[in-house]
């Protein structure tokens, strides 16, 4: 393989966000063999001056003055060079038209300058441009700049179903898919959808940091779980949102399994919990957002894990990160049958087509004996879905496209 190129990667997730992110996993895995520059999705003036996001305030010198914009970030054996562009203009509220296009060109110039700076400051000769789900910034490399070996676009969700980014993103993604040298998607649903624009579209699913979950046996039980000693525990992690989580099903689970404790990790909007009467149930513990190591620690001690997703257009496009993390921990998993991707795990998880089946499957999962063979079967599936394997797939596709050009 030709691994002499650098990778300039623009990702939707910011590198210092506590939440697990597929694009950051790709970045750190790629950095084991190539130099990777990870450009953060730009903070806006609104993020800095009105919302006062703590991640933005920490980077004041870079955002306001363009100083200290590079930061080496190490995770495990991988190390990326994180790049912070200057503050952008908050323009998503504007309709399509002259004003939006004019201000959008200003925002694009911030990314163009960031990439030009990387090429100059680090003497970049050959590089890939990898854009992960920010299609409005796919055309930030101008003709006068050093051109990449490839321009890669990756889609990880159905952009039309994410209200905020759908406004301008649908049109921009179509253009990005048409212009890219290589298009990657994370699910069968996205592959089918984007294949209507061009072919081929390559499916490279999400994965897990298998070694992290494999090493869980030596960890101490989280303090928050000590209060539930003797209780069966049911675990859910991820982005807890009404766009994807079946809240009525979650309420049914809590009411049916009153003697069990539901542990739910991830960001959540309190108004949604109140609307579905989930805010004050004693057998639900809302753990809040937490990093992947802490999630792995909880998974070492819970009795089963669940994926209570709605079955809709958005979830049809989702290959959830959590599925391989749950399996890497060897836990029984109960999920709604929401997509072709989740159906592919039918041999090692419990799939439910309705709430009654979901309840029955949780009962089966909680009643499972500690069967080492079954645990190892789940872990073998997850091991085959590691980020190391996914990186091999991506590199193979990249090499093929470079050879074609």
Image (spheres, rainbow, N blue to C red):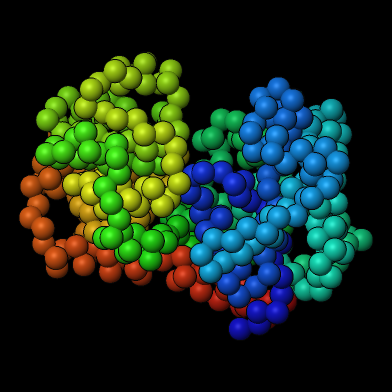
- Residue 268 left/right relative to 46: left
Question: Residue 33: image x %, image y %?
Answer: 60, 75
Question: Residue 334: image x %, image y %?
Answer: 22, 46
Q: Going 56% across and 52% down the picture, which residue do you hit?
A: 155
Asked where in the image residue 119 lies, by quadrant, the reply is bottom right
- Residue 90 left/right relative to 391: right
Asked where in the image residue 225 lies, by quadrant, the reply is top left
Residue 178 visible, this angle: no
Question: Residue 331: image x %, image y %?
Answer: 23, 54
- Residue 198 left/right relative to 117: left
Q: Going 38% across and 66% down the picture, which residue do you hit?
A: 211
Question: Residue 160: image x %, image y %?
Answer: 55, 37
Query: Considering the image in quadrants, where does the N terminus appear?
Result: bottom right
Q: Nearer the viewer, residue 390 or 336?
A: 390
Q: Going 21% across and 67% down the picture, which residue do you hit?
A: 376
Query: Considering the image in quadrants, where does the C terminus appear?
Result: bottom right
Q: Going 34% across and 68% down the picture, which residue do you hit?
A: 383
- Residue 338 left/right relative to 57: left
Q: Nearer the viewer, residue 189 or 356?
A: 356
Q: How many marks?
A: 0
Residue 302 visible, this angle: yes
Spot the residue most to the right: 144
Q: Nearer the viewer, residue 114 or 297?
A: 297
């Amino acid at each position: 393989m030709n691994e002499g190129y650098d990778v300039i990667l623009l990702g939707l997730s910011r590198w210092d966000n506590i939440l697990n992110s597929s694009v950051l996993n790709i970045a750190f895995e790629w950095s084991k063999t190539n130099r990777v520059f990870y450009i953060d999705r730009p903070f806006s003036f609104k993020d800095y001056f009105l919302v006062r996001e703590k991640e933005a305030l920490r980077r004041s010198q870079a955002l306001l003055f363009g100083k200290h914009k590079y930061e080496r970030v190490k995770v495990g054996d991988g190390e990326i060079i994180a790049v912070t562009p200057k503050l952008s203009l908050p323009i998503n509220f504007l309709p399509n038209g002259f004003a939006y296009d004019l201000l959008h060109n200003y925002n694009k110039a911030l990314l163009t300058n960031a990439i030009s700076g990387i090429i100059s400051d680090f003497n970049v000769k050959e590089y890939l441009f990898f854009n992960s789900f920010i299609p409005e910034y796919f055309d930030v490399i101008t003709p006068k700049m050093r051109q990449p070996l490839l321009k890669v676009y990756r889609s990880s969700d159905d952009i039309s179903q994410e209200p905020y980014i759908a406004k301008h993103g649908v049109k921009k993604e179509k253009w990005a898919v048409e212009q890219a040298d290589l298009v990657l998607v994370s699910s069968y649903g996205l592959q089918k959808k984007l294949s209507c624009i061009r072919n081929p579209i390559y499916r490279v699913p999400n994965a897990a940091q298998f070694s992290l979950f494999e090493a869980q046996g030596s960890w101490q039980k989280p303090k928050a779980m000590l209060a539930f000693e003797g209780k069966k525990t049911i675990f859910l992690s991820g982005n807890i949102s009404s766009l994807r989580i079946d809240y009525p099903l979650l309420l049914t689970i809590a009411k049916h399994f009153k003697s069990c404790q539901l542990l739910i990790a991830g960001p959540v909007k309190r108004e949604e919990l109140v609307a579905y009467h989930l805010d004050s149930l004693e057998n639900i513990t809302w753990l809040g957002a937490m990093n992947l190591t802490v999630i792995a620690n909880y998974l070492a001690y819970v009795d089963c894990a669940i994926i209570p997703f709605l079955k809709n257009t958005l979830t049809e496009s989702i290959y959830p990160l959590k599925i391989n993390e749950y399996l890497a921990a060897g836990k029984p998993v109960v999920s709604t049958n929401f997509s072709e991707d989740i159906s592919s795990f039918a041999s090692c998880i419990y799939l439910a087509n309705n709430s009654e089946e979901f309840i029955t499957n949780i009962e089966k999962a909680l009643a499972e004996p500690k069967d080492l063979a079954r645990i190892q079967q789940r872990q073998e599936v997850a091991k085959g879905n590691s980020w190391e394997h996914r990186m091999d797939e991506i590199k193979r596709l990249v090499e093929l496209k470079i050879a074609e050009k």
